[in-house]
Image (cartoon, helix red, strand yellow):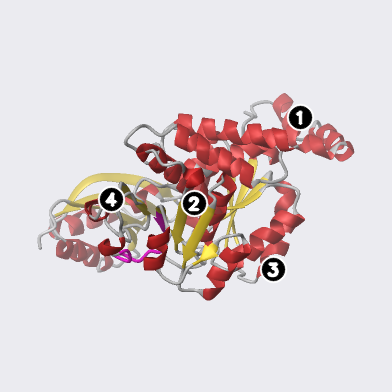
Amino acid sequence: MNDRNITRAFVVETPSVPGNLGKVATAIGFSGGDIGEVETVQVGPTSTLRTFTVHCDHEEQLKQIQEAIRELGGGIRLHAVSDDVLRAHEGGKIHMTSRFDVRSLADLRRVYTPGVANVCRVIEEEPEKARLYTSIGNTVAIVTDGTAILGLGDIGPVAGMPVMEGKAALFDRFVGISGIPILLSSQDPDEMVRTVKTISPGFGGILLEDIGSPRCFEIEERLKNELDIPVMHDDQHGTAVVTLAAVISAARSVGVDLKDAVVGQIGLGAAGLACCRMYMAYGVPKVIGADKSDAAKKRLQQHGGEPVDSVEELLKQSDIVVATTGVPGLIQEKWVRDGHIILALSNPKPEIEPEAAQSAGAAYAADGRSVNNILGFPGIFRGVLNARSSEISHEMLVAAAEAIADQTKPGELVPHPLNSRVHQVVAQAVETVAQTEK
């Protein structure tokens, strides 16, 4: 197969000797590559780092170019070959900047010594004023141990850093919050809880991210009980908020009263169990669940849900079916009955294709391509930080889900995740509930 128009960025370090740039360019050209751009990334005392944007015709040619550069020797080093996505991540996606421009001694005295001592004294006497005179009240720690990264699994905290930087970028872009990634090298719940508690004075909230089940339940619960700032595990509650919003929208579209329906949840992992708890918090009278794990079914029962023995049995009893298993084709068409609402949310392949579910009689069917946590966590934390709340309650999460559903246009399952208006509305809804709960 001939993969035309392949573009890659070659990051090459050359000793600071005349002619080395020409050697690299010649090696690329003789191997069939076309240089589109050369960018000087860093000039050091003994070497220069450059990025060569190279176009070639196929993967074999790409390998030939790499080998030609490596064979040059003389201290010339090929550090990386990046595509557009990798190149966008070079240097990371986030950077801490100052909000105050220091250009004079007067500026220096205000932001640092000696003026800053007065601010320290004010906070010492009235600790709550740290939210006013420091960034603490607008900063969220994004904490991970890297054990459940984006469906990639246990790849470690450092490999998960691009995801944490992405969360931080979204916090800043949509609601102006400073998100700080915190990578934990331990998977021991006691040590993780102790570490987060130790660093917590520097943050207004804690977002737990990509921590494996079942440890995530214990870690979140302990931190919520032992800290006086809001804590949320996004894989549980962020997912549950957006899922509830999708269920509300789907039910509205076919005229089903969600508060008079039976909702069945297939998959009772961290996200699935949190979804069940959200349905119940919203007012769904009966929530049933199916999972291979007896421990997962027991947790559902402890929270007020009803486990069933099979997916087939769940579809028999449910008006609305939500699946988050990651198992394509799990739901058979013969189990679908007329009037069903089916949301098969696993990506990239759903438990049943929406077209197949509808042809089998479902009144509404959708997959999970548009159901994204981005719609939830930025606004939720903006709302609780604005309200200076010490926790994130289920009432706040339900308010967030209703706000998302109310912003959903006819024909859509949830709003577009880049719609800034949605994030502001979610923040307002959460802040309103938070203020009433004080």
Name the residue that disc number 3 marks: 191
Q: CA distance from mark 4 to mark 1?
A: 45 Å
Q: Amino acid at mark 1?
A: Arg
Q: Which mark is residue 239?
A: 2
Q: Amino acid at mark 2?
A: Thr
Dominant secondary structure of the magenta stretch? loop
Report the residue at 45% width, 51% height from top. 44
CB atoms of marks 1 and 2 within 8 Å: no
Q: Earlier in the sequence, mark 4 or mark 1?
A: 4
In the picture, measured across the screen, residue 424 lies left or right of residue 75, that is right
User: For mark 3, does the 10 Å Cα neighbourhood hold few (<14), some (14 to 19), or many (20 or more) residues?
Assistant: some
Q: Secondary structure at mark 4?
A: strand
Name the residue that disc number 4 marks: 52
Q: Which mark is residue 109?
A: 1
Report the residue at 54% width, 63% height from top. 306
Report the residue at 26% width, 61% height from top. 333
Q: Which residues are magenta?
A: 321-331
In the picture, measured across the screen, residue 380 lies left or right of residue 125, that is left
Q: Horizontal and vertical percent for residue 88?
A: 37, 47
